[in-house]
Image (cartoon, coloured by chain):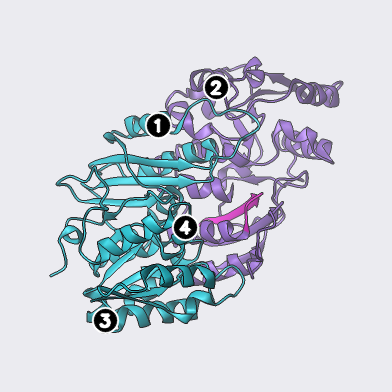
Chain colours: A cyan, B purple
Amino acid sequence: MVKIAICAPGKPLKRARADAVLAHVAGREDIEVHFHEQCFAKEGHFAGPDEARLDALLECANDPAFDAVWFAMGGYGSNRIAAQAVAGMNEQARAKSYLGYSDCGFLLAALYKHGIGRVAHGPLAGDIRRDGGEVAIDRALGWLTGDDSGLEPHLDDRPAVAFNLTTLAMLLGTELAPDLSDHVVMVEEVAEYHYAIDRLFFHVTQHLRDIAGLRLGRITDVPENDRPFGKDEVQIAEEWCARSGIPYLGRADIAHDAANRIVPFGLEARRPRA
Amino acid sequence: MVKIAICAPGKPLKRARADAVLAHVAGREDIEVHFHEQCFAKEGHFAGPDEARLDALLECANDPAFDAVWFAMGGYGSNRIAAQAVAGMNEQARAKSYLGYSDCGFLLAALYKHGIGRVAHGPLAGDIRRDGGEVAIDRALGWLTGDDSGLEPHLDDRPAVAFNLTTLAMLLGTELAPDLSDHVVMVEEVAEYHYAIDRLFFHVTQHLRDIAGLRLGRITDVPENDRPFGKDEVQIAEEWCARSGIPYLGRADIAHDAANRIVPFGLEARRPRA
């Protein structure tokens, strides 16, 4: 029995989506899913004020009754509590798995930097809302219960990480950023113009000159600009990698979609739970 | 007679706007304005390919016939040529004034980092299109001809810089970033959600812990989100400054509008031309 606690470090989760996840897993005897009430809190942009989101995360992480912390939603806001969160985590927190993506990348980064738990980039509980969302949920629950079939297929013997491109750009150079030298770095993006993606690649490739290489996930829902950019996302990634001397390694099977595969951070998180 | 060369390191300028600037200055005997033909070039997102934009900038900067380089438009793209531009500049370029803002901040940063010329954040030639645009043009031409009445009114005896917030976030930690320790840093933004502004402030305040202080320009055209953020831009700036130990110094009279005042970079650029 793997006991999974769910909280929302950024935006709130709609209760109907939690209900859909609970209905989907009803009857499974290998897992138990607990949605922290904070998932449904609302204050301005966020699932409750910083203090409430921080407290809920620490309750989930520090409670010996749970084996894993699964993030409900991305949105924006996990950077506002990430430093305090890792500072407040106990030995129980260090033994857990953590799974999420998008804005939760700030937390994944901070956890990985501090060697806390098994950290992975993969589906959120709220992904139940997507077309094919139940497949994403099963992939996430699979990884949390020791099934590696949902892993990103290009993982090799080098440590890897994965991030939303904007999230990565905003965390580089901050107190949340882990040392990514010699890592394969995978990035994905949603709803950004090609010119903004070009600018983000300029920034991240300048910061990441000593990584093992970069893989490009899917870039989805690119808005139509008043004029075409003139290059697609592969050309953008290849060019900035070349300019910074970073090996461009090809595509990655990650994205803001239901097919989003799982990327454990580093090599440690790839080992099955004892 | 101050001779001013105009080029477009990012997006193209509409010819009607150049004509409007030329008509506005017709009859003035103290200045001569030259629009480089590259201002009107188009390739994808840009005012011509990187090579053409770089060549035009170097022609304007390195030509002893000109006293100043004035940027036509922002948009996006000056980061793609800034490093090569400063590397290709000669002694003539070092004696000139440079004026612009928005995406041109990448170039202003690189010029200032390398001690090239008198660099200032202020109106672009293309600002003629704005309501009150002629006032902005006169302010820019005033500064380029030795009139300091358009300077940002909060400048004190400390060195200052000014940037668009996104541009600053994207250049920090890159090869274009100057040392901003002990500087007053002014920022403005346009057309970004409050949550994105919060995220940008997280990033820049983490990078700029040793600055003298931060001033907040106008944050204009904030899109309406599906839910209110819960804080305004002053609260956002104050909070992140407090969290990073940066003195918040109040507002600055800079923005993506015709009232955008002039911020010379450092103390050197405040001295009138000999």
Give the residue type at disc 3. Asn
**Residue lying farthest to the front in this orientation:** A27
- Chain under label 1? A
Give the residue type at disc 1. Val
- Which residue is found at the position 71% from the left and 48% from the top? B151
- Disc 3 from disc 2: Cα separation: 55 Å
Image check: B233 left or right of A32? right
Image check: A140 left or right of A195? left
- The quadrant in which residue B185 appears is bottom right
- Chain under label 4? B
- Which residue is found at the position 75% from the left and 36% from the top? B127
- Disc 1 from disc 4: Cα separation: 26 Å
Quarter of the image where the N terminus of chain A is located: bottom left
Image check: A271 left or right of B3? left
Q: Is label 1 in contact with label 4 (beta carbons under 8 Å)?
A: no
Disc 3 versus disc 1: nearer the observer: 1
- Disc 2 from disc 1: Cα separation: 23 Å
Residue carrying label 1:
A234
Residue carrying label 3:
A90
Give the residue type at disc 4. His
**Residue B267: % across, % down:** 57, 48
- Neighbour class for label 3 at 10 Å: few (<14), some, many (≥20)? some
User: Which residues are drawn in magenta?
Assistant: B181-193
Instruction: Name the one closer to the observer, B168 or B186.
Output: B168
- Chain under label 2? B
- Disc 4 from disc 2: Cα separation: 30 Å
**Residue A135: % across, % down:** 37, 55
Q: Point out the tag, 4 or 2, that comes first from the N-terminus.
A: 2
Residue carrying label 4:
B203
Residue A155 visible in the snapshot:
yes
- Disc 4 from disc 3: Cα separation: 27 Å
Instruction: Name the one closer to the observer, A231 or B95.
Output: A231
